[in-house]
Amino acid sequence: MKKITYLFAVLFLLTIGLKAQGGQECNIKYNLFKGNVTTKKYAEAKPDLDWLMVNCPTLSVNIYKYGATVAEKTKDAVLAKKVYEGRLANFPNKSVAKAHSDYASFLIKNKLGTDDEIFSILEKAYKISPKDMGVKNIFRYFKGIVSRFKDTNPQKVFDTYDDVMESVGEKLDDYNKKLGPLLAKDSTATLDKKEKRNLKIYSTNSKALGQVEGGLDAILSEIATCERLIPIYTRDYDANKTNGVWLKRAVSRMYNKGCQGDPLFEKLVTSYAEVTQSADAINFAAGVLEKNGDAKGAAEMRKKAFDLETDPLKKARLKLREAQGTSSKSRARALAYEALKYNPNMGKAYLFIASLYAKSANSCGSDVFEKKMTYVAALNKAMKAQRVDPGSGAGRYIKSYKRNVPSKKDIFQKGIAPGSSFRVKCWIGESVRVPN
């Protein structure tokens, strides 16, 4: 009996020793592998990567993260698939949406896989976490949804758009919050090396997301017309009249597409306000009151909505929406500046002011030069939007306004010195520099 006990003890110790030895070997191989990847010796990293995936598949998710880089850099499609599948099998709960998205990007870049195969992978990523997908892949996925369902199931297109835009909006808000302090510090030239790097990363990512937002809007604008929306929302209203999310999206889309004139809009707003009692809903209800001639009631309701909201970014959006619905240009500008008090990095508020200036070009000057100087004022605001909020989509506004500023000939004929100060006339009353 003692001999048997002794034998089991020896076997147990041997097993522990083998496991420890195996673990030690895994760590050695992993460090060699990691060292080769970080020093860009991708071909040399391959043997250790293969060994690790066979012998130590659950040691670290970084085996697969670095492995994806090795496959990408060596353009090895077989290895890429092996790394992708190994990561999903061994780490099914760690950044899986990003893993799907990254693999789809690899297939697209190297022209491997059909459109349907890539869409299927992107769909998996989207269902798990849209916000963890690559920026370009969010756009690709939505285009795939549009091409498949725009005629057979437009509601699915709208729902996907809303989900994606909410995800993009969350990411943009996050970058906006991070950029604010960095931009303020950058203006005093006191950023350290890490902060400069973060400023560049946040600005680049924010700008890319803003382009996606604009691209999604452009695609949807062809589908989401009032002629199409009204019958769909009329049909689905009874089934969704207590669904706050559905009502919010329906109201927002009808508003953004300029469908407020249809009686359905008021019906949707009323239900939205009753069901959610949210600041957003009450603010829309204020707009309905104003449309119906109750200016006093509308003002009281807007104040209620504004006081109810606690998030500064959302308060800023409420002020900007009020500005967008105001007919007086000077009043609209004042409201946009109020929005900027709650979110100084709200690029869309600056772009709104820029658009007010651009629309006033023909009435704010007695000659060609003076009228074109209005576009200089608009350009300044658009450039400010781009500086404080790279995701605002300011680029296309800047291009447009630049095409309309005074030429050298205009300036010469006016007899004014380039670089001198000029006060734009009428309600704008703003001093700007004459282009050089």
Image (cartoon, rainbow, N blue to C red):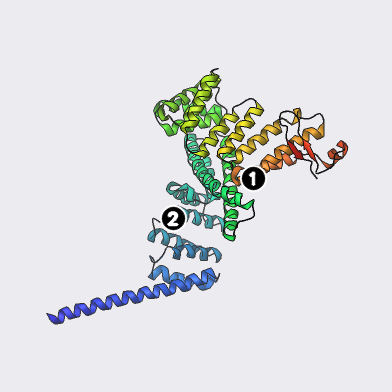
| Amino acid bearing label 1 | Gln
Identify the mark at residue 95; answer none if there is no mark: 2
Q: At 13% across and 81% down in the image, what residue appears?
A: 2
Q: Residue at horizontal 51%, vertical 27%?
A: 302
Q: Is residue 232 visible?
A: no
Seen from the viewer's position, the closer of residues 92 and 205 is 205
**Residue 246 against residue 94 in the figure, above or below:** above
Q: Which type of secondary structure does the marked residue at label 2 adopt?
A: loop
Residue at screen point 65% across, 25% down: 328
Q: Residues within 10 Å of mark 2 (few under 14, many from 20)?
A: some
Near-viewer residue (113 or 6): 6
Which residue is more in the foreground, 418 or 351?
Answer: 418
* Image position, residue 133 (x, y; %): 50, 51
The disc at residue 119 is none
The answer for how far apart the CA atoms under marks 2 and 1 are is: 31 Å
On the image, numbered disc 1 is attached to which residue?
386
- Furthest toward the bottom, the residue is 3
Q: Is residue 290 above or below residue 314?
A: above
Q: Is residue 165 left or right of residue 236?
A: right
Q: Measuring from the top left, give residue 293's x and y in whole percent.
A: 55, 17
Q: Is residue 7 above or below residue 170?
A: below
Q: Is residue 347 visible?
A: yes
Mark 2 and mark 1 lie on one chain; the one further toward the N terminus is 2
User: In terms of secondary structure, where does tag 1 sit?
Assistant: helix
Asked whether disc 2 touches disc 1, contact meaning CB atoms under 8 Å apart, the reply is: no
The residue furthest top is 293
Which is more foreground, mark 2 or mark 1? 1
Q: Position of residue 345 (x, y in %)?
A: 59, 43
